[in-house]
Amino acid sequence: MPDAVSEETLVEQFKAIAHPLRLRILDSLSRSERNVGELEQVTGIGQPALSQQLSVLRKAGLVETRKEAKLVFYRIAASELGELCSVLTGLAPAGSQPRNPAQPATPSPAPGVANFARLS
């Protein structure tokens, strides 16, 4: 039977994975090692949010880094994690993509446009 520390670590890792932006980052890293600029382009996540999410993944032991000159490259810590990300993203309905929590779920109306409720 696994010891309590291993179970706690596993739970913390699943908590780190269970976020739309972090899952998107891990999915991208499962394909290849990338630097922060590449991750920003591929995932569409802005630099401040990206750095914050990468920090969470790094602290959970899910990603590893290497520095080359001024660039920091990220990669998945274990190949099994890449396989897990593929399975998890494959469970999403076709054509869906994780929503960026920084963006509203529904688009706001254009300025000056009124919203009316339809009453029956």
Image (cartoon, rainbow, N blue to C red):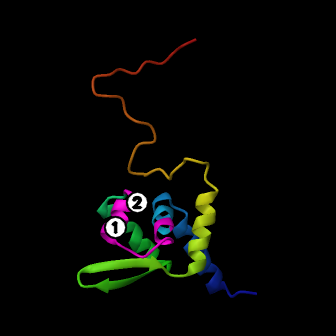
Question: What amino acid type is highlighted by mark number 1?
Answer: Glu
Depicted 82 relative to depicted 2: above or below: above
Q: Residue furthest top?
A: 120
Residue occupying the point 31% across, 85% down: 67
33 and 24: which one is in front? 33
Q: Which residues are magenta?
A: 27-44
Ranked by sequence position, the earlier of labels 2 and 1 is 1
Question: Which residue appears at 40% of the width and 21% of the height?
Answer: 115
The quarter of the image holding the N terminus is: bottom right
- Expressed as whole percent of the image width and height from the top left, the position of residue 23 reads 51, 63
The reply to whether discs 2 and 1 touch (Cβ–Cβ < 8 Å) is no
Residue 105: percent from left, percent from top: 46, 42
Q: Position of residue 64 (x, y in %)?
A: 44, 82
Q: Residues within 10 Å of mark 1 (few under 14, many from 20)?
A: few
**SS class of the residue under badge 1?**
helix
Splitting the image into 4 quarters, where does residue 2 fall? bottom right
- The vertical placement of 99 against 108, above or below, is below
